[in-house]
Image (cartoon, rainbow, N blue to C red):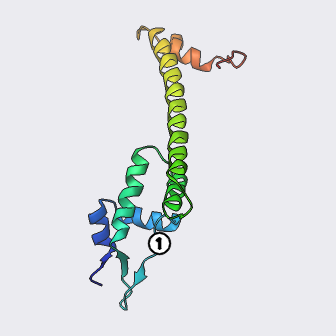
Amino acid sequence: MLHSLTIGKLAKKADVSIDSIRFYERRGLIAEPTRTESNYRVYPLEAADRLRFIKKAQRLGFSLGEIQELLELSHDPVASKADVKAKTEEKIEDIRGKIQDLSRMLKALEQLDESCDGHGPIAECPILKALATDDSHECHH
């Protein structure tokens, strides 16, 4: 018991909610805890480090599935730094693609915004008209 934490203490130590811990358990990202004789969940101290790893990886854009893969790699004796680097480079490319998509969306929204002076009846709103127009014949790529 000296080297274990209750779910509340673990949540506080790792700066996550109790619900997050239970969610990560269900997803298999952290192991199910052992239980005391009085049926309290007790987690090893290392669980806090694992939770911090998960949260930091999420902040960097990794999905839970990708985090699971990173965790598996970290415990794979035949894995190499190149394997982790490849996962990181895949995420970089994914983020670059999202940035390009967001840039296109921003440009389109800015053009819509510029088309409207913000005065007059809504029936004459160029933004709503543009959104209602079927321009599926145009190529956006």
Residue at the image position 69 percent from the left and 15 percent from the top:
138
Q: Is residue 104 above or below residue 51?
A: above
Horizontal and vertical percent position of residue 117? 42, 7
Identify residue type, mark 1.
Ala
Residue furthest out toward the bottom: 37
Q: Residues within 10 Å of mark 1 (few under 14, many from 20)?
A: few
Toward the right, the furthest residue is 137
- At horizontal 38% and vertical 79% (from top left) the residue drawn is 41
Is 48 situated above or below 67?
below
Would residue 106 be found to the left or right of residue 135 on screen?
A: left
Picture mark count: 1
**Left of 34 or right of it: where is 66?**
right
Vertical arrangement, residue 44 with respect to residue 38, above or below: above
Please state, as top left, top right, bottom left or bottom right, where the N terminus lies in the image: bottom left
The residue under the point 29% across, 79% down is 3
Q: Which residue is mark 1?
A: 31
Element at label 1: loop
The percent coordinates of residue 121 (x first, y second) are 47, 11
Name the residue nearer the viewer: 117 or 67.
Answer: 67
Work out whether residue 30 or residue 110 is closer to the camera in this orientation and state it.
30
Q: What quarter of the picture does the C terminus occupy?
A: top right
Which percent across, then down, holds residue 88?
50, 44
